[in-house]
Image (spheres, rainbow, N blue to C red):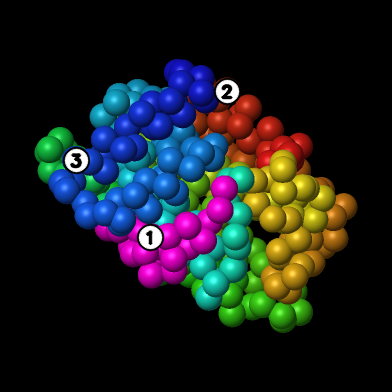
Amino acid sequence: MRTYNEYRSMAEEALIPALSSLGQIPSPLLEAMCYSLQGGGKRIRPVLLLAACEMAGGNAEDALPFACALEMVHTYSLIHDDLPAMDNDDLRRGQPTNHKVYGESIAILAGDGLLNAAMEVMAAAAVKSGRPEGIRAAETIMRHAGVTGMIAGQTADITSEGKTPREDTVRYIHEHKTSDLLEAAVEAGLILGGASEEQVAAGHEYALHTGLAFQMTDDLLDVTGSAAELGKNPGKDADQNKMTWVALRGAEGTAEDACREAELALNALRKLPWDTEFFKAFTESLPGRKK
């Protein structure tokens, strides 16, 4: 397997060509889509997808269209999250948010465009390969991103603002708003690599708990981090009365729970027959991350 930065470079280099493969996209739509898509970030989801594919014995190059599509889905969700009607943010990855640069109408269309582009890229790759794994991987990604996945979590997040935090509601939000796209990455990667149903299920369990650890740490950083470290404005959760793990358990309890979820993720890795050191290292880095 390759290093995190090697997988990240693969995804970075393939993103714009994947978008360009769809044909002539009008300006300023294309410019707005590329602005957010090229806006940096850790590229966690495409990296995990490519690594999972190779771990299972697959070809990472063949999985690139799906990795790019997943990053398009993630980027669209950030553009829409930042809109005034949602989280009303003006900073993302250290840069002005999409609607601050291009206006709300184009930002909405840029998000719509990236979501649709993701479906086109995956469908084309699945047709080209002629393998059922491509169709399964595309279905997995869109299901986790959809109305029973990430969008369900976003809906719960918005409709729960200002309410007294409840553990079941906070966990639901975290499982869907954050864990679902990590589950999509690991599951789709394993499917493309030819993993068994049992192995995909173990990957799902790993990504679920890793996503919870990630979001718990994110909630904590919103309280303790700075704009320079995070690339976005801290304190927004409290300002908007968001239902977060910190609001439920406090800073110390959130840190403890993040470590527990990370350990559950590591336990799930032990069910897989391959060298899982890449994923182990990723999860172990989460509780102490600064951005």
Q: Earlier in the sequence, mark 3 or mark 1?
A: 3
Q: Which residues are magenta?
A: 95-116
Q: CA distance from mark 2 to mark 1?
A: 35 Å
Residue ID at (48%, 43%): 39
**Tag 2: amino acid:** Glu
Q: Earlier in the sequence, mark 2 or mark 3?
A: 3
In this rendering, would 118 be left or right of 177?
left
Count of numbered labels shown in the rendering: 3
**Tag 1: amino acid:** Gly
Please name the residue that numbered disc 2 is placed on: 277
Q: Residues within 10 Å of mark 1 (few under 14, many from 20)?
A: many
User: Callout 2: helix, strand or loop?
Assistant: helix
Q: Residues within 10 Å of mark 3 (few under 14, many from 20)?
A: few
User: Callout 1: helix, strand or loop?
Assistant: helix
User: Callout 3: helix, strand or loop?
Assistant: loop
Image position, residue 90 (x, y; %) = 60, 60
Against 177, residue 62 (above or below) is above
Secondary structure predominantly adopted by residues drawn in magenta: helix
Q: CA distance from mark 3 to mark 1?
A: 18 Å
Image position, residue 93 (x, y; %) = 58, 46
Q: Mark on residue 111?
A: 1
Q: Can residue 194 be spotted in the picture?
A: no
